[in-house]
Image: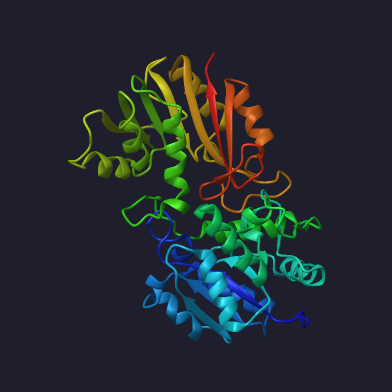
Amino acid sequence: MKNLGEHLIVVQASTVSWRGDIDPCFHTLWSKPVIYETLKRIRQHCPDTRIVVVAPAYDENSELAKFTNYFANVATFFGFDESPLERLIGVCELYECDFLIRIDGLHFCADMAVAEKMLEVARSEKLDCVKLPDDFPVHYTSDIYSRSGLLQAKSAINLSGEKKYEIHPKYLMFRDQGFVTLEYKNLPKYSPDFMRENRAVFQEIRFPRHNVTDKAIPLGDLASFHYEIACRHLTRGMNVLDVACGTGYGSCMMADVTASVVGADLAEEVIKANASDSALPENLSFVSENVERLSFNDQSFDAVVSMETIDYVDEELYLQEIKRVLKPGGVFILSTQQNRAEYLSVNSVSETGYTPESVNRAVGKYFEITKVYSFKAGRIYFEDDFVGRNLILVAKLG
């Protein structure tokens, strides 16, 4: 790698996710945590640049601390449990670096060639932040931050109280004219074979079902925020079906604000575990169901909620079944990942994932779409911006 000045490669990681369960970068890939593969690939491309694994203070005695032993010139920095921004500032000040390349520990296929080009632009144009488009396939992405930009972001957040930007300060920087930023437009074109290779690696990661625990940090817990959004569109008298309910944390949230909730999931062992909880409210039950062939009668529910499901099923069968079991005027709420259509999705069984336009077309064939939320990260979304990593559609059956 050519000399681009004083900078670091920072890999953000943790053993605990924002939901409070195991962080994705610590799930197993080929007998080691995924972050090992991320560091290996970064080191192969950038043999000399210092890498710092940056993690919360609670991880100082965890397995993360061992990564300095696996690769040359890799250090660790621990601190500030709830503030990734403070961690980035801390590592900049410790190493007196002007710029850093930030990479998520899960993103083993982050495009380091693009990261180098972004860094060069940031240095030459004295930018506070450079990022890729918000719907660029997330596993290939990196961000460039200047130390001065991070310090300015900290001051702005302290004044505004908008703590959500401590997770991803780039979204503050790109909305505040006080920062000098650039969205990188010279996007790479990956071959189908290359994308399929990375997709195959991702499929080797052993992911358990997501869960939200008492260790969750609300500012970054998008899984719970999905259901908080859904609850805004539900009423006390509704009977609700929660499709692909998983461990049932969202079903429990909705049971607090509706007449009844049925949590349905294909995984029988998950349903049995959910149903065995003696603390379940009386208006909540769990059943094993295939969303492409639901067992419920026509017009059984006032609302159907379905998070992160449409990518993994037959789209037409799925939407037809949702329509069949909804009452006229019923509410349908779903979430899905966003991905630019020309790129093969790394972490989905569907070929490309969805753009806002493509999911609107699919759902619009059967329902009237009434509201769209497009999420950047954590709880960050903007009413005037529909490009992001993930979205929720709220729709009505006519």
Give the x, y percent position of residue 333.
49, 30
Query: 183 or 181, which lies in front?
Result: 181
Give the x, y percent position of residue 276.
21, 42
How many marks can you see? 0
Q: Is residue 211 above or below residue 244?
A: below
Give the x, y percent position of residue 275.
24, 38
Q: Is residue 36 left or right of residue 242?
A: right
Q: Is residue 379 above or below residue 9?
A: above
Q: Is residue 384 left or right of residue 72?
A: right
Give the x, y percent position of residue 145.
66, 67
Seen from this angle, which residue lies furthest left? 278
- Image quadrant holding the N terminus, namely bottom right
Query: 99 or 260, which lies in front?
Result: 99
Query: Residue 63's image quarter?
Result: bottom left
Q: Residue at x 37, y 25 (%)?
A: 240
Q: Is residue 109 left or right of residue 70?
A: right
Q: Is residue 369 visible?
A: yes
Seen from this angle, which residue lies furthest front? 159
Query: 330 or 243, which lies in front?
Result: 330
Q: Residue at x 59, y 73 (%)?
A: 10
Q: Residue at x 39, y 32 (%)?
A: 242
Q: Is residue 167 visible?
A: no
